[in-house]
Amino acid sequence: MELVLASRSRYRARMLAEAGIAATVDPADVDERAFDDLLSSDGPETLALELARRKALAVAPRHPGALVLGADQVGVLPTPGGPRLLTQQPDPDHAVAQLLSLSGTTHRLVNGLVLLDTANRREFTGTDVQEVTFRSLTEPEVRRYVDRFRPWDTAGSYRLEDQEDMPPGEGFVTSVVGEDPSGVLGLPLPLLRRLLSRTDPSAPQDP
């Protein structure tokens, strides 16, 4: 059965290809900010799943009989006033400010996956959580990072893979706790494989 990725993320498309999972890419047009209130009312897992579901549902009518994958990642920084959403920042000053707010803290990256089996009208869902800890940062080094890597297209204003291209000792991330690093990049592959296995009743089911 054809797999359709309802996302415009080049990172997710690349991860599928590198994992040997064939997929057609058909980006969904969803206003993600329209659902921000779900963070405070229902939590980040619900928000991530709802965004992923909206993406899958937007694309599904164009692909009858296919498996349609919606995916979304919600970055959340705990604060005394409640969780704060980490978002894409379109310019250097805002990206620097967001990164400095992560200095010396641990934030959560919550992934929601929704897989629609359009042929059988079934839905399979799951969430993945990554906890990412930053060392203490200074504004000059954050500005150097932003100027070099221009992280406009990622929530939190950083990419985990950029850390490998930074000089020793200058990476921001000190630890990542989660099932698999692919979850930091926005498409947790172990979770996806479990969902895909559930679409085939004859396949062995992962615990």
Image (cartoon, rainbow, N blue to C red):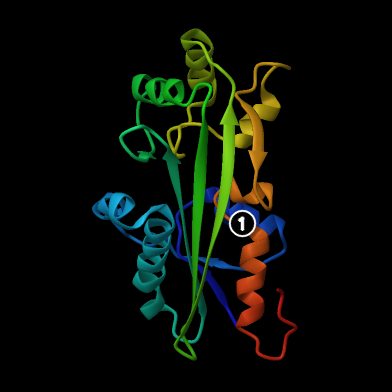
Residue 30 seen anywhere in this rendered image of the structure: yes
Q: Residue at x 68, y 62 (%)?
A: 190
Q: Residue furthest front?
A: 80
Residue 185 seen anywhere in this rendered image of the structure: no
- Disc 1 target residue: 188
Q: Where does residue 86 sit, x and y in percent of width and height?
A: 40, 38
* On screen, residue 18 above or below 20: above
Quadrant of residue 99 within the rendered picture: top left
Relative side of 90 to 20, left or right: left
* On screen, residue 105 above or below 117: above
Binning the other alpha carbons within 10 Å of mark 1 as few (below 14), some (14 to 19) or many (20 upward) gives many
Q: Residue at x 66, y 90 (%)?
A: 201
Q: Nearer the viewer, residue 38 or 6?
A: 38
For the C terminus, the quadrant is bottom right
Amino acid found under the numbered disc labelled 1: Pro
Count of numbered tags: 1
